[in-house]
Amino acid sequence: MFTPTPLNLPPYPFKITQKDDVVFIFDELRKKHLVLTSEEWVRQHFIQNLILEKKFPRTLIQIEGGLVLNQLQKRSDILVYNTAGEKLMLIECKAPKVKITQSVFDQASRYNSIHQARWIVLTNGLQHVYARMDTEKGSFNFVEEMPEYLGL
């Protein structure tokens, strides 16, 4: 059974149900119940943080979008778009027990080589890393806090 880890994000009133020994969380964006894993716990918290705290429009958030990298099918956890359909932010979510390391950043960077988003965000719910792409230098600038949607 799933035991929620307290995260470094505000608490939100999720709809959590259980059937037999399986716990589900209702995903408000996809309008369906999902098996509640540690990574899903982080993803749902971060999505609510984007919407409620950072004022990201719900309609511009895509969850688990597919991409092809080196002829392999992959999924990016969260993509955020602007109203012109351009990819603004790639967010990679990990379970709280997974440390945010260089290899996690490298994974997100590989995904972003396809997406070309202006921001890469890594989170395990406890630690959050925000990197803004510097297109002139082809590098990233790390920042302490993620701006609100209109500040991107």
Image (cartoon, rainbow, N blue to C red):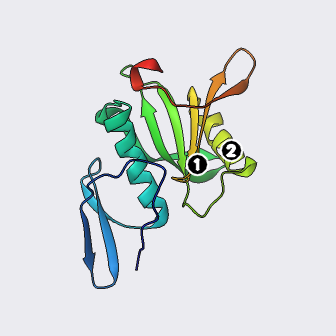
- Residue 43: x and y, percent? 44, 52
Mark 1: secondary structure = loop
Height in image: 61 above or below 73? above
- Residue 29: x and y, percent? 29, 47
Going by the image, does 127 lie left or right of 84? right
Dot 1 amino acid type = Gln
Whichever of labels 1 and 2 marks the residue nearer the N terminus, that label is: 2
**In front: 86, or 38?**
38
Badge 1: how crowded within 10 Å, few (<14), some, or many (20+)?
A: few
Residue at left offset 43%, top offset 46%: 46
Query: What is the tally of numbered marks visible in this picture?
Result: 2
Going by the image, does 88 lie left or right of 143? left
| Residue designated by label 1 | 127
- Residue 105: x and y, percent? 68, 44
Q: Is residue 70 visible?
A: no
Height in image: 1 above or below 34? below
Height in image: 12 above or below 62? below
Image quadrant in which you'd find residue 99: bottom right
Residue at left offset 42%, top offset 29%: 81
Extreme residue in the top direction: 136
- Residue 146: x and y, percent? 51, 31
Image quadrant in which you'd find residue 55: top left
Height in image: 10 above or below 40? above
Dot 2 amino acid type = Phe
Quarter of the picture holding the N terminus: bottom left
Mark 2: secondary structure = helix
Q: Residue 75 got which mark?
A: none
Dot 1 and dot 2 residues touching (CB under 8 Å): no
| Residue designated by label 2 | 105
